[in-house]
Amino acid sequence: MADKKKPRLAVWKFASCDGCQLSLLDCEDELLAVAGAIDIAYFPEATRGEISGRYDVSLVEGSVTNAHDAERIKEVRKRSNVLITIGACATAGGIQALKNFADVKEYIPVVYAHPEYIHTLATSTPISDHVKVDFELRGCPISKKQLVELVSAFVAGRKPVTPPHSVCIDCKLRGNVCVMVAHGAPCIGPVTHTGCDALCPSFNRGCFGCFGPKETPNTKALSGQLAELGMDSKAIKRIYSTFNVNAEAFREESKRHG
Amino acid sequence: MASKTIKVDYLARVEGEGAFKVVVRDGTVRKAELRIFEPPRFFEAFLRGRSYMEASDITARICGICPVAYQMCAVHSMEKILGIKVDDALRELRRLLYCGEWIESHVLHVYMLHAPDFLGYDSAIHMAKDHGDLVRTALRLKKIGNDIMTMVGGREIHPINVKVGGFYKVPSKRDLQSMVENLKWARDAAIDMVRFVAKLDFPDNERDYEFVSLRHDKEYPLNEGRVVSSKGIDIPVEEYDQHFKETHVEHSTALQSHIVGRGPYFVGPLARYSLNFDKLTPTAQQVAREAGLGKTCSNPFRSIIVRSVETVYAVEEALRIIGSYEQPEKPFIAAEPRAGVGCAATEAPRGLIYHRYEIAADGSIVHARIVPPTAQNQPTIEKDLTSFVADWLDLPDVELQHRCEQAIRNYDPCISCSCHFLKLDIDRA
């Protein structure tokens, strides 16, 4: 097959830990096959080579936290036929979106001696707040399995299969004992989007929401259950306020608890 | 030769966002700046008010390549406050998890990020077209590191199994035994990796570094030890703040570290190796000697060999731990929170990392401080580059720029971490 017919892939980074794009390099068994099926046209973490022009698909990691990045994402959109966000930062704003609920002017001197050198927006926002996003892959980090599915689906020209059900369903499928019922462990698996294969309950701990809210989550009912376990409102607020704190369902439930 | 500026606006094959700028005036290098523009994410600020139990899960998100380093520093700091000591099999399991991270991170850097510079390729993927077996071996070796992370930590990026007091769930002896055959292959592959990188061409660039790393009586340092330097520092980690200070410079969202009263220092594989050669396994020592290394190494271009030697060590250490492992009765030591201050330093793949926390009686975090390896190394990297560039000024800009990029990759900078960095800018005007 002539190289010029291969789709061109670009990988972009905004505010993030690099973990989601690292997931691509962590696909040790599939990486060379992926590189055979597509042209990696821009992926600075992996290559200094760069193919200019348009990209068939852009994978975007990270959230928008400064004015420069708010402009940069528009350029990425212009040059990309399909734009897919990868991970909780790009999809919901990430853990750094905790600043959305605080005074960023108060945050800066906690970390930096010269606040005047720091240029940051008051918020950390998902890519979809700035440009049209064609598909979102959840997770902190994303699932390698879903990433390979996403790339395969793109190459085949079909829709990726990434189910929207809850972690709770996966737990039942794995035959796990319910950590909340059996051990009283706080778990937000009932309202959290699948993708991890119910990892935490399989390690005897409650889900803490890496994949963000599932479709139509009943967070209010779950919070009632968490209160019955003895969690105070501060603790309930915290459990929704991590990597997907800015995802609507978690944000609203978090706000209900102070 | 006149004046010019050389800049790299976005350094490739490093972890995070950074740039590099060199200013040349009348044929003399005036300044080399490693610009870290990774957007700040304010971890130390939003950790306040969180539970002491959450610090390991939250700080892991500073870096997707070395999350274990953050998790280990967080839990060890909290355990000091709670007055508990994680020992025996649980301590060994934490060491095993860290070995997994060293293997995964070192192999990623040696083959995927660094080796293409020496062999003349843009990336490992381009390199694979001519060196298919080499890249396939690297990927398999890296995967074995990730397999350890998955087995002990639950997953390779942001493991979920680390907990204050131990783990949520401990693997059985049989679980760990399932990795032994692959690890035996990995030991041979890692030894071959040292022999392969030893044959690359290296410039003579010995530097006068003050190396800083942990040192432990009985083992090559990972999770525990005194903070020592090649120029006389030998302190418990509790005294770290008295000897090391951070400053904030305009061109970087990473804070820079100095030794009080002396200046820049250097953490990472070269420091660890040079201060702890005697604690490596006999095989690792032997392959290091065969590769032409002495008991110390202060040529940053040879760091690729040192990382490879450390990979041999990590694989052998993993085998040792698995060989003597007995599943502990309880996965963790339970303890109630109490008010206090605790700090810990561990050895991330890129060098010493330090955390310090103050928590209130209810277990909520009052104050957090995190000093990652690349931030500590930034002044040394800038000093080295100023010196290297002076020798390369006759090169055409494109080549000079590429040399600078290569030199920066010697340090395996982790920019997401350091800012919690790269763009090259050579100003000769």
Image: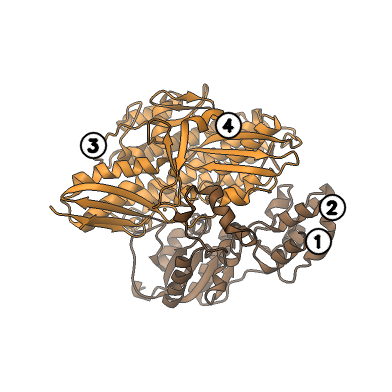
Q: Which of A231 and B427 is in front in this view?
A: B427
Q: What element carries label 1?
A: helix
Marks 4/2: CA–CA distance: 35 Å
Badges 4 and 1: C-beta atoms under 8 Å apart? no
Q: Is residue B12 above or below residue B82?
A: below
- Disc nearest the viewer among 3 and 4: 3
Q: Residue A222 carries which label?
A: 1
Residue at the (74%, 35%) spot, across then down: B338
- Disc nearest the viewer among 3 and 2: 3
Chain designation of label 4: B
Instruction: Say whether disc 3 or disc 4 marks the residue closer to the N-terminus.
Output: 3
Marks 3/1: CA–CA distance: 63 Å
Q: What residue type is labelled 2?
A: Val
Counting other residues with Cα less than 10 Å from the Cα at mark 1, is it few (<14), some (14-19), or many (20 or more)? some
Badges 1 and 2: C-beta atoms under 8 Å apart? no
Counting other residues with Cα less than 10 Å from the Cα at mark 4, is it few (<14), some (14-19), or many (20 or more)? some
Q: Which mark is residue B205?
A: none
Instruction: Say whether disc 1 or disc 2 marks the residue closer to the N-terminus.
Output: 2
Q: Name the residue under label 4.
A: B321
Q: Residue A181 carries which label?
A: 2
- Disc nearest the viewer among 4 and 1: 1
Q: Is residue B185 above or below residue A122?
A: above
Which chain is brown in the rendering?
A
Q: Mark 3 points at which residue?
A: B204
Residue B180 is at least partly visible in this image: no
The picture places residue A42, in percent across and down from the top left corner, at 39, 65
* Badge 3 and badge 4 in a common chain: yes
Q: Which of B317 and A90 is in front in this view?
A: A90
Residue at the (52%, 54%) spot, across then down: A17
What colour denotes chain B? orange
